[in-house]
Amino acid sequence: VQLQASGGGLVQAGDFLRLSCAASVRTFSMRSLGWFRQAAGKEREFVASIGWGGRTTTYGDSVEGRFSISRDNAKDTVYLQMYSLKPEDTAAYYCAVRRAGYAAVAITPGEYETWGQGTLGTVSS
């Protein structure tokens, strides 16, 4: 299974970015999904997670109210809508999927089985 993240780029503060992450095979069934990010010189940080049904979501404190996670199970794709971006949001963003049967949201990297390669989002001031 491979996850392919896309949508990163260079934007200005206050702008919007939408990240996508698609699986190479049908694999999102009964699994929760998450987004993490890692800025240069910092540890990986939890951004958002969404449960299998799409109704349960949770966010990291630094993005709560500005970012939105969603999923399309028919397309095996998870999205991250990022609004009101700040320079401190600059990071490589990684999508991840939990093991089969783990449908609840999760906030720690160790709870995820498979990771995408990362897509870079840069926010200029």
Image: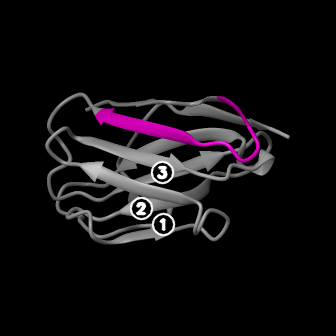
Image marks 1 and 2: residues in contact by CB distance under 8 Å:
yes
In the rendering, at what x and y percent does residue 53 appear? 20, 64
Q: Is residue 101 within the magenta segment?
A: no
CB under 8 Å between callouts 2 and 3? yes
- Relative height, residue 35 to residue 56 (above, below): above
Residue at horizontal 43%, vertical 35%?
A: 116
What is the C-alpha distance between the residues marked 1 and 2?
Answer: 7 Å
Q: Which residues are magenta?
A: 10-22
Q: Which sits earlier in the primary sequence, circle 2 or circle 3? A: 3
**Is residue 20 found inside the magenta-colored segment of the image?**
yes
Q: Residue at x 70, y 52 (%)?
A: 43
Q: For residue 40, which quarter of the picture?
A: top right
Residue depicted at x 16% and y 59%: 30
| Residue 107 circle label | 1
In the picture provided, is 48 more to the left or to the right than 102? Answer: right
Q: How many angstroms separate mark 2 from mark 3 (CA)?
A: 6 Å
Dot 3, how many residues are within 10 Å of its Cα: few (below 14), some (14-19), or many (20+)? many
Q: Position of residue 88 (x, y in %)?
A: 78, 50
Which quadrant of the view contains residue 92?
Answer: top right
Alpha-carbon distance for marks 1 and 3? 9 Å
Q: Secondary structure at mark 3?
A: strand
Q: Which residue is mark 2?
A: 49
